[in-house]
């Protein structure tokens, strides 16, 4: 039997953090053994909010390096850049015509980003060099509204059956499913109906500065997250500054969200269960827990950082180009089928 196909992607914006790795990339490395795996750097999605061109190009390479350093094997999986295959936007336009505006306006991520009204520019080192609050009208582009349609096109173009996502992305998979069913009903069986793949472990890594919200690469404060390329000194500083709950005893409880988050991270980067960690440190203080957690995270990230730093840009670009060439025939065949169903003349 042929393997099922999975598709997933990461935007080349911001710096990936421990939550991204534990909640997504680590799972993808495991899934590539079982599925025909397609992983994408979704640069078209990134420009739905303002990007500095030089920085966007640099981040695209960095995200690809992250995939490879984390364990994505280019011999087992296909890795490519979204904008290298024009059929993504071609299919998006066609799907636009069967999508209701009301569906898009209900999307949680659209409403959240539209509310922010923030523009950020960064230099080639990723440092923020300009920031201003702008009007919702200027910030909220049609691209931001239509983002889920492009995501649906990404998925449906390759007959994807499984999409590994976090809880915050399930709504996007539902739109992809609805559009696939709608097109199939109107024009005949064309698209595979994808399913979301949710894995509970590591999904809820929260911000170090606010344990009520997920760790985020777009958070204003660098103390929100442990970035994958942080130095040992930076990791230590961030954990030592991490917020704590009231009370000095160590326990794993929903009533102690900050402490629970630290223990979850500790458990995710070691072989220890949350119960073991809570028991080991029950008679110790936050300082000792944070120091041990710091050491564990530094050790956990060391192999990733070593491999990342060994990767050369030219080698990564070669892998990305090979991936696009491998997928082009699949994308071309699917868009040809779609055009024929719609009634276009094929030349």
Image: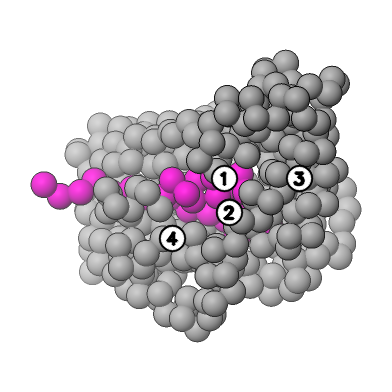
**Residue to which mark 2 is pinned:** 300
Establish if 95 lies above or below 245.
below
Is the C-beta separation of discs 3 and 1 under 8 Å? no
Is the C-beta separation of discs 1 and 2 under 8 Å? yes
Q: CA distance from mark 4 to mark 3?
A: 28 Å
Count of labels shown?
A: 4
Which comes sooner in the sequence, label 3 or label 2? Answer: 3
Farthest top residue in view: 255
Mark 1, residues whose alpha carbon is within 10 Å: few (<14), some, or many (≥20)? some
Disc 2, SS: helix
Q: Which residues are magenta?
A: 1-28
Farthest bottom residue in view: 314
| Residue ID at (50%, 65%) | 69
Asked if one can make out residue 277 in the rendered structure from this viewpoint, the answer is yes
Mark 4, residues whose alpha carbon is within 10 Å: few (<14), some, or many (≥20)? some
**Residue to which mark 1 is pinned:** 269
């Amino acid at each position: 039997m042929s393997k099922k196909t999975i598709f997933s992607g990461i935007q080349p914006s911001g710096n990936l953090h421990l939550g991204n790795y534990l909640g997504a990339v680590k799972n993808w490395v495991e899934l590539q053994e079982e599925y025909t795996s397609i992983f994408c750097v979704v640069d078209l999605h990134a420009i739905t909010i303002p990007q500095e061109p030089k920085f966007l190009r640099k981040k695209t390479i960095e995200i690809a390096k992250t995939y490879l350093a984390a364990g994505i094997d280019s011999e087992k999986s296909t890795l490519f850049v979204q904008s290298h295959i024009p059929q993504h936007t071609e299919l998006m336009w066609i799907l636009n015509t069967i999508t209701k505006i009301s569906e898009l306006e209900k999307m949680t991520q659209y409403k959240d980003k539209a509310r922010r009204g923030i523009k950020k520019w960064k230099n080639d080192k990723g440092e923020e060099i300009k920031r201003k609050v702008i009007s919702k009208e200027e910030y909220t582009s049609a691209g931001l509204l239509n983002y889920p349609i492009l995501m649906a096109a990404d998925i449906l173009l390759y007959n994807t059956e499984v999409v590994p996502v976090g809880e915050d992305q399930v709504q996007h998979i539902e739109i992809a499913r609805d559009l696939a069913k709608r097109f199939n009903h109107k024009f005949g069986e064309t698209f595979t109906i994808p399913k979301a793949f949710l894995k509970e472990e590591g999904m809820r890594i929260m911000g170090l500065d606010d344990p009520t919200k997920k760790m985020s690469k777009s958070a204003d404060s660098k103390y929100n997250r442990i970035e994958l390329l942080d130095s040992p000194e930076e990791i230590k500083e961030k954990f030592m500054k991490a917020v704590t709950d009231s009370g000095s005893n160590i326990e794993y409880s929903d009533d102690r969200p900050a402490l629970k988050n630290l223990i979850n991270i500790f458990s995710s980067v070691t072989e220890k269960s949350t119960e073991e960690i809570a028991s080991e440190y029950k008679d110790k203080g936050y300082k000792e827990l944070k120091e041990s957690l710091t050491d564990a995270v530094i050790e956990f990230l060391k192999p990733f950082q070593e491999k990342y730093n060994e990767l050369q840009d030219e080698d990564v670009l070669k892998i990305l180009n090979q991936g696009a060439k491998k997928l082009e025939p699949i994308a071309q065949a699917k868009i040809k089928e779609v055009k024929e169903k719609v009634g276009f003349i094929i030349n």
